[in-house]
Every structure is written in structure tokens, then in C-alpha cells.
Amino acid sequence: MSSIAVAAAIFCCLLLGALAGMALRGVIPHHHLDSDTRDLIKLGVGLIGTMSALVLGLLVASAKGAYDTKKSELAQMAGNAILLDRVLAHYGPDSAGARDALRGALVAMVKSDSANHLEQLGQATPVAREELFDTLQALVPQTDAQRALLAEAKSLTINLAQTRWLVFAQGGSSISTPFLVIVVSWLTVLYLSFGLFAPRNATAFITLVVSAVSVAGALFLILDLDHPFSGLMQIPDAALRNALTVIGK
């Protein structure tokens, strides 16, 4: 389910909670809402609000940490690709095939015809990756310098492949679904209490709607941040595109 759909569902839960609170206000006997009961309810929802804030902080930290990690790994891939190309360039003309294979693999990652092409970063073009390994294995160094450069090129290629498969292995969500469900349930209880004490007028209802939209929007940003290769906050492929401008030159 997309982040927008989840955020919309969260908004509906919050709004339904507020409406349920308004409806309960007309059903609950007045002596059940005396000053002492109101104070107890406020203490309870205050505790729930504090716990919700703490868990939301954990969700933000988890999503931001995963986002920054994958952004760093993408930049590392671009840097290793540039270094590998320069090592192959110093190897000599025999490495032209390997350099072409490297450039082809990067081109496959930054296809301009797909908005979410990086979402399948670890899956794209397995043939191109194998071609790069096979081309390096086919090289026959003639001097000690070429042997050293070839060994370095193979090491960089392995590091590049490791980073790419690491990005693929980390493709799952960093946000625990039970965490999210619990937070939404707590927030729904909060809005139920808001509706329970809110006056029945347009201003109060609009205030509840606007605050529910704000909370759902905040959770949307957290969920979108948890999908760094798609959505509104996806990691830009500028690092890979910059690498392409120098690879093969």
C-alpha cells in the first residue's frame, strides 16, 4: 500500500475517532462527565499523548537513519564506479570492454524513462554485472603494473557488487507495522477524547479536521522517507549521473 493511501487511512481513523467522541458525548450520562472524571480523562489522554510522541520519535529516527544509510551507499557506489573506471583507464586499451560494461551497468541504473528506476537497484541488469566480472577475468596482464591494477579493479568490482546487493537486501521497510498500528490506535483514542469534550460547532469541527490532516501528513512524511527510492522524497540519482559524466572519458 502506498504512503498516500496509508496516510489517508490514518486521517479517516482520526476523524472517525473524533466523531465517535462527539457521538458519545450525547450518550454518556452527565454525572459521568463531572469535573473529577474530566480530570482523570485528561490525565489518561496526556499519558497516551506522551507515549505517542515517544514512539513517533522512534519512527522518525528509524526512517531517517535508513534513508541516510541508503543515500550514503548510493554515493559510495558512484565513487567506487569512478575509481574503478580510472584504474581500468590506467590499465590500458585492453580494458575498454570492461569500461564499457561498467558504463552500461550505470546507465541501466539511471534510466530516464522511469521515475522509480532506483527502486529496483539491486535487481536491475544482472547480465551487465556478470559481463563486467567476465570481462575482467578475461584480461591478461603483461606487466607487474597491469597485474596490480587488475587486482585493484577486481577488488573494486567486488566492493561495488557488495554495496549494490546490500542496498537490495535493505529494500524492506524499516518501520515496524505493529509500531505504526499502535501509534495510530493511540492517536485515535486521543481524537476520541477531543471529540468527547469539543463543542458542537463548525469551528471545533474544522479544528479537528485540520489537526487530523496535520498528523496524517506527518505520518505520510515518515512513511515516504522509509521508501527512499520512490515517492516524493526519493533519493536523487545525481551521484550516479555525475559518475556517468566522467566514466569512459
Image (cartoon, grey):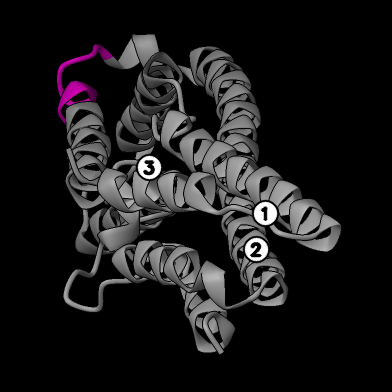
Q: Residue at x 50, y 21 (%)?
A: 38
Position in image of residue 39 (x %, y %): 58, 20
Position of 214 relative to 155 (above/below)? below
Q: Residue at x 59, y 57 (%)?
A: 77
Mark 2 neighbour density, 10 Å: few (under 14) some (14–19) many (20 or more) = many
- Quadrant of residue 134 in the image? top left
Mark 1 neighbour density, 10 Å: few (under 14) some (14–19) many (20 or more) = many
Q: Residue at x 40, y 25 (%)?
A: 180
**In the rendered structure, which amino acid carries the disc numbered 2?**
Leu
| Image-based side of 187 in relation to 231, left or right | right
Question: Rounded to the nearest whole Å, what is the CA distance between mark 3 and mark 2?
Answer: 19 Å
**In the rendered structure, which amino acid carries the disc numbered 1?**
Ala
Q: Which residue is mark 3?
A: 122
Instruction: Mark 2 or mark 1: name the one nearer the start of the chain.
Output: 2
Image marks 2 and 1: residues in contact by CB distance under 8 Å: yes
Position in image of residue 99 (x %, y %): 49, 70
Q: Which residue is mark 1?
A: 153
SS under mark 1: helix
Position in image of residue 190 (x %, y %): 42, 29
| Residue reaching furthest to the front | 142
Q: Nearer the viewer, residue 86 or 26?
A: 86
Q: Residue at x 48, y 48 (%)?
A: 138
Instruction: Mark 3 or mark 1: name the one nearer the start of the chain.
Output: 3
**In the rendered structure, which amino acid carries the disc numbered 3?**
Gly
